[in-house]
Amino acid sequence: MARVWNFSAGPAALPQPVLEQVREEMLDWHGAGMGVMEMSHRGKEFTGIVEQAEADLRELLGVPAGYKVLFLQGGATQQFAQIPMNLLAGGSADYLVTGSWSKKALKEAQRVVAGSGSVRCAGSTEGGGFLDLPDPARLDLDPRAAYFHLCTNETIHGVEVPPDYALPTHAPIVADMSSHILSRPVDVSRYGLIYAGAQKNIGPSGVTLVIVRDDLLGRAAPSVPSVMDFAVMAEHGSMLNTPPTFAIYVAGLVFQWLKAQGGLAAIERVNAAKADLLYACIDASDGFYRNPVAAACRSRMNVPFTLADGALDAAFLAETKAAGLVSLKGHKSFGGMRASIYNAMPLDGVRVLVDFMNDFARCKA
Ligand code: PMP
């Protein structure tokens, strides 16, 4: 069996030991005589799986008391709508736009509130091509905002909000962490709500993580469907209806794998080394490769880059593929290439990519 080095932005590579364990347990989970996909979500086996997954996640992220952890469905895109439905309560919200995903979140929130509240852009870097973060002191904030929304890692543009970025203090912070959650320690207490689709650093697609502070629950209008109401879902332990059981189970195995790696501080060291290696290769290429994002907010998880000569793109993609390096084609809105190097991508995979890139540049320059 030949496994490739998979640089997909998501769904993305999973840790191989997790996949092996899933294979091992597929037909008979811990002597239950059935696999997890076949179990009742109300039975004691699955209840144990979900409780363990939540406990491990809380430990990894250091989620303080006073926050609920929800395992929902609909992806991060559903959260773009569900968050204003739950938090806006007819008021206003501030959105920071630093790439395609936060722009989409703003648009969807505007669509959802239509007439019953206001959703404002508090700052945008679109004019400059999403290459930097705005000066936090110069944001246009509404002092009465119900929340402030941002995307802490823009998957397409490769812009990551560093931990020392001064977040506003006028309103609870709501963060889309889909593409860098669990890649480094985070101070959860700075946030009112954190959300993430699973298919990058958590597990398979199909489960969406929401971590929400208790005081933000119970603000949804009575017309909000119960399955979309955070308070109702929290009351039912995310099991008002059938949850995505298999995705939650695999996510739980990923959490255990992360703990075995030494937790988030340990994985952060590996992630920093991987990103440093790749950006150093790009920056040392004399312009053969280029990443235009400001150094202070270059993403450690998603590294977009272009080739100076776009006519070489096809050869780059064909030759990387032949060398077992796949899913490097950049997003259509950015062009060029993108290497997504989430937790499951080992340093060795990035070394192989960097060696290839250096050879390719030498041959074609
Ligand atoms: N936010 C970010 C930062 C993303 O990267 C993505 C998906 N790549 C989304 C939101 C949308 O996620 P989903 O497909 O789970 O709805």
Image: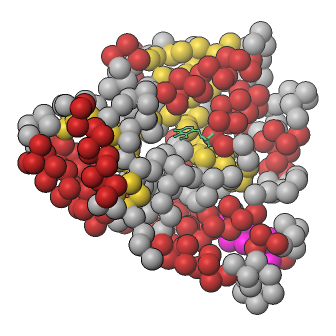
Over which residues does the magenta segment extend? 45-53
x, y (%) of residue 232? 86, 45
Q: Can residue 37 be seen in this view?
A: yes
In reply to whether residue 114 is colored magenta, the answer given is: no
User: Which quadrant is home to the C terminus?
Assistant: top left
Answer with left or right where residue 170 lies relative to residue 2. Answer: right
**Residue 157 in picture, x, y percent from top left:** 39, 32
Q: In this view, does 108 lie to the left or right of 300?
A: right
Q: Residue at x 38, y 54 (%)?
A: 326
Closer to the camera in the image, 194 or 300:
300
Viewer-closest of 252 and 146:
252
Residue 265 seen in this snapshot: no
User: Where ligand 1 lies, by image quadrant?
Assistant: top right
Total labels drawn = 0
Residue sitting at the far top: 115
**Residue drawn at 54 percent across, 44 percent down:** 178
Residue 83 vs residue 59: left or right? Answer: right
